[in-house]
Image: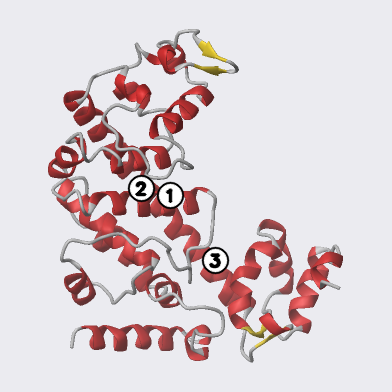
Amino acid sequence: MDASINKKWLSYGDQLELLVRRGMRVEDQSRAEKLLSYVSYYRLSGYFRYWQKDPSYGDDSFIDGTSFERIYNLYEAERKLSSVCKELLARCEILLRTRFAHHYGESCAPSKSFAYGEGFTQPPSVDEVLIQERILSDLDRSKDLFIAHYRDEIKQGLHFAPQAYDRLPIWVAVEAVSFGTLSRMIEASGDSGVLDAMADSLGTTRRVLPSQVRSFVYLRNRTAHYGRLWNISVRDSPALQKTKRRIRRDYRPFDEQSVYEILVALHDLGKRAGICEDVLGKYIEPLLENQPLLAYGISTPKRYGEVPREVLLDDEWARKRTENERGISNE
């Protein structure tokens, strides 16, 4: 029988006792129990797992030297990084909404056409959702008064018909669609010239911009839902414009499909577009320099069992490991 079916309810004290029984060191049990009432055991278990000996095969005991306080401090440091990321991504998202609306309105039409899919290259598969259907779905769900102001009561069944949005300007519509929908709109606007004009205005290219925006959407969604950033691999890496070697030399080494690679893309676009001269140096590195364990997992994510034990237990080891990898990347 699957053991997960019969999980027992545990009080905060019982949760802490379980961690201690499995070999975790707890310096202040009263404080640790209180922290477990603020941040759930389950949320923290995504971090605990890296210190466990072999959880995939049922050995949930912790390696010698595992500290509750060290893991919780990692969680807190990551929370601060996530907050900074949300602020930076908000600036970027507003910039992208502004530029798309400006260039779509200029190249296609100020209103009406987007609701009918004009200016968009549709997905190749008949099973995929059309771009205008995504837009209309977002607009239909909107409770914003500025959308209702332009929306006419023309319906097809339970939903508003495309004609309901004939008066809605594109610069109003983009404020109500999700960031994910906006990303698809940008990527699908290549044939109409909108993508080229937008990329040019941001100092980038039509090849690079769509993948960067997709990665921003991914990071924005993780931070918005307070998802773990440490030691996760990103499925869709952003394209970068000849910046990898310089970033690895001037800041730190990083792997492809790392969260840090998305931050590099944010740094790149922010500098080219003129909204932030030095995202990494001003906002990210000051946090990571004092948190070598966080920095290691953000820049060189590893799977369970692959993070060196010394890195998990000692900040100096984590810092030296990063410095060694920086030296290798510069050779």
Q: Is residue 207 above or below residue 155?
A: below
Sequence-wise, the earlier of marks 1 and 3 is 3
Are the two marked residues, 1 and 3, in contact with CB atoms closer than 8 angstroms?
Answer: no
Residue at x 60% of width, y 82% of height = 51
- Which residue, given by chain and number where applicable, does mark 1 sit on? 220
- Going by the numbered disc 1, the residue's amino acid type is Arg
- Going by the numbered disc 3, the residue's amino acid type is Tyr
The local crowd at label 2, few if under 14, some if 14 to 19, many if 20 or more residues have their Cα within 10 Å, is many
Task: Return the mark for residue 89.
Answer: 2
Residue 198 appears anywhere in the view: yes
What is the residue that sits farthest to the front in this orientation? 126
- Which residue, given by chain and number where applicable, does mark 3 sit on? 75
Q: Is residue 90 above or below residue 64?
A: above
Of badges 1 and 3, the one in the foreground is 1
Q: Residue 25 appears in which quarter of the rendering?
A: bottom right
Q: Position of residue 78 (x, y in %)?
A: 48, 63
Residue at x 37% of width, y 47% of height = 87
- Going by the numbered disc 2, the residue's amino acid type is Leu
Sequence-wise, the earlier of marks 2 and 1 is 2
Residue at x 32% of width, y 17% of height = 112
Q: Nearer the viewer, residue 1 or 244?
A: 1
Distance, label 2 to label 3, CA atoms, is 21 Å
Q: Nearer the viewer, residue 286 or 82?
A: 82
Quadrant including the C terminus:
bottom left
Residue 279 appears anywhere in the view: no
